[in-house]
Image: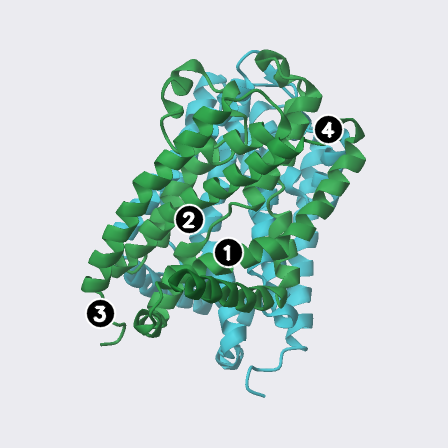
Amino acid sequence: MISNLINRKIITLLKVQYSNMLEYRVEIALWAISGIIPFFMLNIWTNNNLNESINISDVMLSRYFLCAFFVRQFSVVWVVFSFEEDSLMGKVSPYLIQPLNPFFRYFAQHIAEQITRFPFALIIAFFFFIFNPESIWIPNLGILLLSIVSTFFSFLIQFLIQSIIACLCFWTEKASSIERLLFIPTLFLSGLLAPVVSFPAYVKSWIYLTPFPYLIDFPANLLSGNETNISGGLSMQILWIFLLLPLFKKIWSEGTKKYTAMGS
Amino acid sequence: MNLRKYLKVYNKFLHTSLASELEYKTNILVDLITAILSLIGSIFLLSIFFQNNGYIGGWKFEQALIIQGIYTILNGITNTWFNPNLTEIVKHIREGTLDFVLLKPIDSQFFISLKKINPSGFLEIMLGLFLLFFCIRINQINLNISFLTLSLVTISCSICILYSLWFFISTTTIWFVKTWNAIEVLRSFLYIGRFPLNSFSFSLRIFFSVFIPIAFITTIPSEVFLGLSQMWKILLEVIVATVFLITSRKFWLFALKYYSSASS
């Protein structure tokens, strides 16, 4: 009964958000294009033969960066910005009265956006294969499913981290600058610009304990067929989710107690 | 154009926007830390590229640092002036407040481009300058008048090109209302400016110098620093900058003809 209700709520939320997102198809296409940085990076890597140092062939590296692009496309999170806007505009108050945590709304928004973005990402991948026909490959079904799961976990980790930051809006009003701060290690350490294998040893010694390599490097390695520790990576992702979830719940309940509607 | 009047007005803009930004002191502090970490991250990424080859695209690490320095300065300028102002255009058009701007007895482009300022970008400019001075020392560049004037000329041209690109996209808001994502695309392309143009493949080099002249923005000034730059390249940059500035001005005036305020 209860699960049925939750299911219905989630389906409805998804439907609403999906039709909402379809209105902005051009924007989402642009957003997909803005994620092509990994391809520029690939160009630097292959054009300067930098991959020789890390024993990855050109083809594997191009698959890696293509997968990094895909993982990034489906794990981008912008809760902080939505929540900050809603909280400054006073839209959070009506959400709080509803018998549903408003973060479900944002969650549905993100999922709907990913569904809308999927065809654009495919088109970009299609063009990528036209320019790099030798890198075409078909991952086997098991790997594909596992990498979808791990991409979703990556999205979940980022969603939780950003939701925690978003809750800081209850205290500071401008939480997006903290998000920008956190984005820096995400950008440089997640494997979006360079695979984590290529990092110097003094970074590799501790980086696998942080959540960053599991955001892009791990799912991308998994999907592209590069060498990676599958069970270790998945369990680290689950561990981070279980660490962040209670933290989010705690900060959310503290925050709502602290909340005073804008203008009051 | 009455220059003194505009200087006086700009002085007022500076005071008001600084005063309002300084209200969020912790915000500025967080932005400062972000700028420092971002520079560290970029240098870290660059050091990965140089791990075994001494060169990328014919540039040594110490030389590539110059590009990083110039990029940081330009990014600081973007964050201080372009970003806060030109994203405001979207707001003006959505809310119809562009009417008020147009009614003011002052040039609308001047008003829209310089109204606000974000002081946290200053640190980035300082960091970039600091890095540049460091590069001048480690590359043993001797400072003389011709070098200084040439580097000033090329960097100011870069600023003009950068401004025009931003302004151009922001102006299209008059037709498309939401251009936030188009700006994201521009940002991700500008990211390329951190690396020497020669490190990319031939086709990308053409793309980044003909279609979107990002190459001009950082590579040519850096070549001037190293004394490698040919005169025709500098001249070309001056011409490109002038063309961009004039076109952006013309485009603004043209776009205004299509502006109908939000309520009419």
Mark 4, Cα crowd under 10 Å, few <14 / some 14-19 / many 20+, is: some
Same subunit: marks 2 and 3: yes
Distance from label 4 to label 2 (Cα)? 36 Å
Q: Which residue is mark 3?
A: A260
Q: Which mark is residue B201?
A: 4
**Chain B rendering hue:** cyan
Earlier along the polypeptide chain: callout 2 or callout 3?
2
Q: Which chain is green?
A: A
Earlier along the polypeptide chain: callout 3 or callout 1?
1
Left or right, A129 with respect to A112, comes to right
Earlier along the polypeptide chain: callout 1 or callout 2?
1
Quadrant (top left/top right/bottom left/bottom right) for the N terminus of chain B: bottom right
Q: Which mark is residue A159?
A: 2
Distance from label 1 to label 2 (Cα)? 9 Å
Secondary structure under badge 3? loop
Q: Nearer the viewer, mark 4 or mark 2?
A: 2
Quadrant (top left/top right/bottom left/bottom right) for the C terminus of chain B: bottom right
Q: Position of residue A66 (x, y in %)?
A: 65, 34
Q: Which mark is residue A110?
A: 1
